[in-house]
Amino acid sequence: MDWVGRITGDKTPTGAADKHITAEMRGAEVGGLDFKSAVDAHMKWKGRLEAYINGTSDEDLRVDVISCDDKCPLGKWIYSRGGDDFGYSETFFDMKAHHAHFHRCAGDVVRTAQAGDKDEALKLLHHGDYVRASEKVKKLLAKLFVLVVDGKTAIDAHMKWKERLQDFVAGRSTESLDEFSVAREDLCSLGKWINNEGAETFRDNPNFHNLRSAHRKFHEAAGHIVSLASTGQADVAMQLLEDGDYAQASDDVTAALVDMFAKRD
C-alpha cells in the first residue's frame, strides 16, 4: 500500500507506512477518523467541482456552504474529535488552516461558475491556490496519520518489555540483553518515537512530558533488573518486575500513553 507515498510525493513509502500502515488503513479508525476515506473524499472534490462547472452535476452546490470548513466529514472531525485529540499538534494545526483555505478556494470556484464564467472557474480549479491548498491538505493528513500510527506501533513494542525481561531473568530468552543498552531510553522503538515524531506531535501536551520522564525511569529500572539477573540474583530481579521502581515506572508510562492515545466515545 503506497497511498501515503503517492500523497506526500515520495516514490518509496516511508518505513512507518511500509511496515505499519497497510493493515490499519483498511477501514480502521485512528483518533476517530478513517484517514484513507478522508483522503479519498477530499480527492473527489476536484471531480465534483469540475462536473458542476461543466453542468453535468446533479448537486446543488452553495457558495456559503462550500466555503465553510466545518460542513464536510473531515471538517466535522477537525472541529470535534480531531481537535480534542490532536489540537496541540503543529501538523494538525497546519492541516486545519490549509483545510479552511481549501474550502474558501472551492467556494471561489463555485462562485465564479455561478457567475457564468466557466473558463475562469476551470482555471481556478486546475491552477493556483485551490490546487496548492488541496495538495497541502492531503500531505498533512498523510503526515498526521503516519505520526499517530507510528506512535501506536512503538507503544505495542513497549508493552512487550515485561515478557522479554521475565524470559531473560528465567533463562528462557534467546536475547543477549545487557544492562547498559537496556538502561538507555533512546534505543527502543518507543524511545526513538519519543525523541522524533512524538516530540513533534505532542510536545505541547503535558502527558508527553510525563511519558518522557516515566520512560527514562522505566529503562533505568529495567537495566537494573538485567544487571541483577546477570549476577545471579534472579529471584530479586523477578520480584522487582512486579514491585518497586520498575513496576511504578511501567504503570506511569502506560498511564501517560493512555491519556494521549485512548479513543474517546
Image (spheres, grey):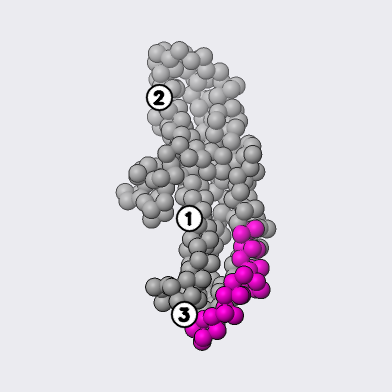
What residue would you read off at disc 3? 178
Tell me the residue at 49%/46% (across/down).
145
The answer to the question of whether label 2 and label 1 lie on touching residues, with beta carbons closer than 8 A, is no
Q: Which amino acid does label 2 sit on?
A: Gly
Q: Of the numbered discs in the image, which one, if any, rests on residue 32?
A: none
Mark 2 vs 1, N-terminal side: 2
Classify residue 233 by image quadrant.
Answer: bottom right
Work out which residue is located at the far bottom of the displayed protein and give it.
Answer: 231
- Does the image show residue 171? yes
Instruction: Identify the main secondary structure in magenta.
Output: helix
Towards the viewer: 100 or 231: 231
Tell me the residue at 48%/68% (across/down).
164
- Does the image show residue 98? no
Towards the viewer: 111 or 55: 55
Q: What residue type is labelled 1?
A: Thr
What residue would you read off at disc 2? 47
Crowd rating for badge 2 (residues with CA inside 10 Å; few <14, some 14–19, many 20+): few
Magenta region, residue range: 229-256
The Cα–Cα distance between marks 1 and 3, rounded to whole angstroms, is 24 Å
Which callout, 2 or 3, points to the residue nearer the camera? 3
Element on which disc 2 rests: helix
The Cα–Cα distance between marks 2 and 3, rounded to whole angstroms, is 58 Å
Tell me the residue at 41%/18% (across/down).
51
Crowd rating for badge 3 (residues with CA inside 10 Å; few <14, some 14–19, many 20+): few
Q: Of the numbered discs in the image, which one, if any, rests on residue 153?
A: 1
